[in-house]
Image: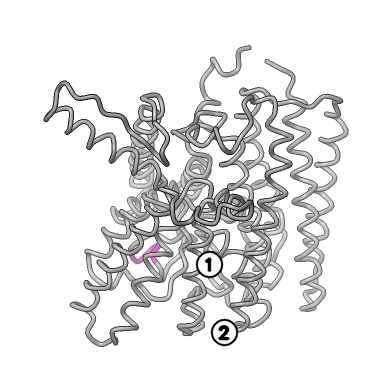
């Protein structure tokens, strides 16, 4: 096994950053006169462990090989989830370690599932910490998708290697620093504008800050149990729609736009695919509601359709109404949207649009070959020819995605959950959506009543889905641990 000092050094740095962000809820405690110092204690422990890892793993020439990049990707998310759950454990919410870990993993993976039953009366410091976890998870996902996953050849992500990453794994760290700085500025700017927009249309300052962070991260944690529906404000819903869509687009497109490519949002194949899917899905749900929900006006049905489609497709998980009561078609349709997700290189989740686009082109090519056996057909994506290696990688990823989905659903069923809860819970976890379907974990429910085994299974599903499956599964192969 190679020297992993760089891996643990990087994890130490991440823990110091995490501990530093814990000071924000500490100041919130002071502002709202909360009579405890749980975040100061949690920050002290986290920073201490982080500094310890840094000092014991100092090296002059820090490089990552491919094997270490896999290890860092998984361990970093797992470490942040473990240390991120400390404030939940120390709080007056009386959460077990499994509950606290579930909440933390849901936050850092931007899933949005929760076990806290009364958010309306939860401490403000805990509410802002949940938002911070999702916000940090969002920027982490973007950086990972742009700099690391393409080098790991994970599920077709190598398609984005040419424009976004270095040629060799040894250059990951310097490239990551460069990209992280630019992306962070864009991410912070969008968050700021989103927060100002929420405040301008009627949200309070605290709610605006918290929701801005979870909106751009497409995470979906809210400060109220009824989510965005608490405000009963159409303007807030429209702001949510706009910034969720902005968070669902590949952030590398923003970089290209700033660098002079003003038409990137009009010509990028993946962005066009996202817009087409949104338009078709919104219209489909709108016509369904017009036929089955005649009590609401034309504009209200359109707004409700747009909000819920955007929220589910992006994996944000905000809700304004219990769509489980709309009938069986919306349940099946939203289950499908959970799997689709947004663009690669964004904060969204799911299988990702580019994989469906390439798979669709592959299927069309196979039909053409049946009609024209001697024809030669190639698949292009963003005017680049896609090799068979990419296509096989994508097909393998999609197959494995659904295989793990069914395994996870089976585990939930064995643990006593009903069919709709098991199926939607599995889909919600692996697609990092948040709420499931049905009465238990649907828009009006939460995950607090699930057995501990189910919570741990869902936590694993969140991690697998967020890290594109292979980055985690490869660690379980004995050959990985050999030189």
> Magenta stretch: residue 6 in it?
no
Q: Residue furthest left?
A: 371
Q: Which residues are magenta?
A: 438-442
Residue found farthest to the top: 483
Q: Position of residue 394 (x, y in %)?
A: 38, 33
Q: Quadrant for residue 478, please give it.
A: top right
Confirm whether the magenta stretch covers residue 441.
yes
The circle on residue 201 is: 2
Q: Secondary structure at mark 2?
A: loop
Q: Would you say 65 lies left or right of 325 here?
A: right
**Image position, residue 80 (x, y; %):** 67, 46
Q: Earlier in the sequence, mark 2 or mark 1?
A: 2
Q: Residue at x 49, y 61 (%)?
A: 448
Q: Considering depth in this image, is 387 or 397 the residue closer to the camera? A: 387
Q: Position of residue 67 (x, y in %)?
A: 62, 23
- Which quarter of the image is occupied by the C terminus? top right
When asked about the image quadrant of residue 184, the answer is bottom right
Q: In this view of the protein, which residue sits in the foreground, 430 or 282?
A: 282
Q: Quadrant of residue 254?
A: bottom right
Q: Is residue 223 left or right of residue 358?
A: right
Q: How many marks?
A: 2
Q: Is residue 237 above or below residue 318?
A: below
Taking the spot 57% from the left edge, 59% from the top edge, the residue there is 217
Instruction: Say which of 211 and 407 sits in front.
Output: 211
- Quarter of the picture containing the N terminus is top right
Residue that numbered label 1 is attached to: 243
How far, Cα to Cα, is label 2 from label 1? 14 Å
């Amino acid at each position: 096994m190679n020297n992993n000092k760089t891996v643990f050094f990087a994890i130490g740095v991440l823990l110091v950053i995490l501990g530093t962000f814990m000071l924000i809820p500490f100041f919130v405690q002071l502002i709202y006169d909360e009579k405890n110092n749980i975040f100061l204690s949690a920050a002290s422990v986290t920073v201490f462990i982080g500094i310890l890892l840094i000092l014991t793993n100092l090296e002059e020439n820090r490089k990552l090989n491919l094997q270490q990049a896999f290890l860092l990707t998984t361990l970093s998310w797992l470490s942040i989830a473990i240390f991120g759950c400390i404030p939940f454990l120390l709080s007056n919410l009386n959460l077990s370690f499994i509950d606290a870990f579930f909440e933390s993993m849901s936050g850092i993976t931007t899933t949005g599932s929760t076990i806290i039953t009364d958010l309306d009366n939860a401490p403000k410091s805990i509410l802002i910490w949940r938002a911070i976890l999702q916000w940090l998870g969002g920027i982490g996902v973007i950086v990972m998708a742009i700099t690391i996953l393409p080098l790991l050849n994970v599920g077709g992500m190598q398609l984005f290697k040419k424009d976004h990453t270095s040629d060799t794994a040894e250059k990951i760290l310097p490239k990551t620093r460069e990209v992280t700085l630019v992306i962070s500025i864009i991410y912070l700017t969008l968050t700021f504008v989103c927060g100002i927009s929420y405040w301008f249309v009627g949200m309070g300052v605290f709610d605006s800050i918290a929701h801005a962070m979870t909106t751009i991260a497409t995470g979906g944690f809210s400060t109220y149990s009824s989510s965005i529906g608490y405000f009963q404000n159409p303007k807030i819903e429209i702001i949510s729609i706009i910034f969720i869509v902005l968070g669902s687009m590949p952030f590398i497109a923003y970089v290209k736009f700033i660098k002079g490519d003003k038409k990137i949002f009009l010509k990028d194949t993946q962005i066009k695919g996202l817009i087409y899917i949104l338009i078709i899905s919104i219209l489909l749900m709108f016509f369904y509601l017009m036929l089955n929900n005649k009590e609401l006006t034309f504009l209200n049905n359109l707004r409700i359709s747009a909000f819920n489609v955007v929220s589910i497709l992006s994996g944000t998980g905000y809700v304004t109404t219990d769509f489980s009561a709309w009938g069986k078609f919306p349940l099946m349709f939203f289950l499908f949207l959970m799997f689709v997700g947004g663009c690669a290189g964004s904060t969204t989740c799911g299988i990702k649009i580019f994989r469906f686009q390439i798979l669709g082109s592959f299927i069309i090519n196979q039909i053409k070959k049946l009609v024209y056996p001697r024809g030669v057909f190639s698949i292009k994506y963003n005017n680049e020819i896609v090799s068979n290696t990419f296509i096989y990688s994508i097909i393998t990823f999609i197959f494995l995605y659904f295989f793990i989905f069914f395994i996870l659903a089976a585990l939930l069923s064995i643990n006593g959950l009903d069919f709709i809860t098991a199926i939607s819970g599995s889909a919600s976890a692996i697609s990092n959506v948040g709420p499931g379907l049905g009465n238990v974990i649907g828009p009006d429910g939460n995950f607090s009543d699930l057995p501990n085994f189910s919570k741990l299974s869902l936590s694993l599903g969140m991690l697998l889905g967020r890290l594109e499956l292979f980055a985690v599964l490869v660690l379980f192969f004995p050959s990985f641990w050999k030189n």
